[in-house]
Amino acid sequence: MDNITTIAELSHEFGGPEYVLGGGGNTSVKDETTLWVKPSGVTLLDIRPEDFVALDRAGLAKLFAIEPPVDPEAREARVKEMVMAARRSGAERRPSVEAPLHNVFPQRYVVHTHPALVNGLACAIHGAEACSRLFPEALWLPYCDPGFTLSREARRAIGDYTERWGVAPGVLIIENHGVFVAGESAEDIRAAYRQLIETLRAEYRAAGLECDLPPTPPPDRETDERMRQRLRTILSADEVSHVASSGPFPPPRGPLTPDHVVYARAFVHVGPISARSVAAFRRQHGYGPRVFFDPAGVWAVGATEKEAQMALAFARDGARVQYLAAAFGGPKYLGDRSRAFIEGWEVEHYRRQVSLGAG
């Protein structure tokens, strides 16, 4: 089996909802001169060997030799330009924004995901301390903006780790983000994920927590229809072309990872839904809510059915991460500056459009 077929199979294996949702996560394989990485927005479950974007590794490495613009928008535009320029002849798709970070790992295979079981640790107040105790060989990286800043900080941290221990880390856990697993073989990847997940499951059980939110019955038909009609009355047609609903679960009280911000928005509407409450939400946050929590259930709106369903899925994932974080001191939410960067980042808007089939 060739390496690109292997990374495609690993992508499928770690592309299910226990590891990523929507277009989240990315994977790569490399040799001495070329990195093949997942295109932006393409799902791990759907990717084919021919979909991977071939990049010149030396071209990618040039990113770390430049002094990027201070302005975040200008910086990310410059980085995008250089990553696109590193594409091999014939490569047309837009590579994952995290391609430079994949290139930093010396190992052949890299699989990056956002499992709720891992993010219960990564999004926790005492996550760093717990990571050191549970996974002493892993590298923990404090939160930083995704894109160039993350690649630069991870490169520095991986270099320091390698200099200290004489070997590159196989597991990188990024605060309020997810995990990168690197290895020379597919079995290296599987074994590292197996240890991560099994260790964390045991830790949650020891803390008296279930590993998933308990299932709840959906709202009855009359309540569901009444809420859908209320949303259509209050919101514009563009906001509420489609509605998805589920049984109740505890609402996430703040933004936990970039993906939660992108798909479900940083904050959700909690409590009775009315024109006044939605107007107050808009005044406070600067945008309309995408997800609504009520004691009878949860409703998510979107321009398409897929958009509404993904918003609901990410809201539930956020609730699950928030719940699991209780094992490590409680949830740690993204700060306002970090949240604002994600909300305005062109890369995330592009990825969301592609993953939702809108572009």
Image: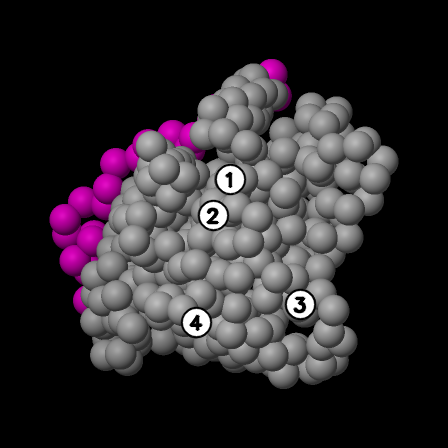
Q: Amino acid at mark 3?
A: Lys
Asked if the residue under mark 1 is in contact with the one under mark 2, i.e. CB atoms within 8 Å, the reply is yes
Please tell me which residue is depicted at 82% across the width and 44% down the height of the picture: 160
Q: What is the spatial separation of the Cα atoms under label 3 and label 4, in whole angstroms?
A: 26 Å
Q: What is the spatial separation of the Cα atoms under label 3 and label 1, in whole angstroms?
A: 21 Å
Q: Which residue is mark 4?
A: 349
In the rendered image of this protein, does residue 345 appear above or below residue 185? below
Please tell me which residue is depicted at 37% across the width and 54% down the height of the picture: 52
The residue stretch that appears in magenta? 206-230
Q: What is the spatial separation of the Cα atoms under label 2 and label 1, in whole angstroms?
A: 6 Å
Is 195 contained in the magenta span? Answer: no
Asked if the residue under mark 4 is in contact with the one under mark 1, i.e. CB atoms within 8 Å, the reply is no
Visible in this render: residue 15?
no
Q: Amino acid at mark 2?
A: Ser
Q: Which residue is mark 3?
A: 62
Within-10-Å neighbours for mark 4: few <14, some 14–19, many 20+ = some
Frontmost of labels 3 and 4 is: 3
Q: What is the spatial separation of the Cα atoms under label 4 and label 2, in whole angstroms?
A: 22 Å
Please tell me which residue is depicted at 72% across the width and 28% down the height of the picture: 137
Q: Amino acid at mark 1?
A: Tyr
Q: Secondary structure at mark 1?
A: strand
Precedes in sequence: disc 2 or disc 1:
2
What x and y, as percent, mark residue 244?
25, 56
Q: Which residue is mark 1?
A: 109
**Quick check: 12 left or right of 194?**
left
Q: Amino acid at mark 4?
A: His
Q: What is the spatial separation of the Cα atoms under label 1 and label 4, in whole angstroms?
A: 27 Å
Frontmost of labels 2 and 3 is: 3
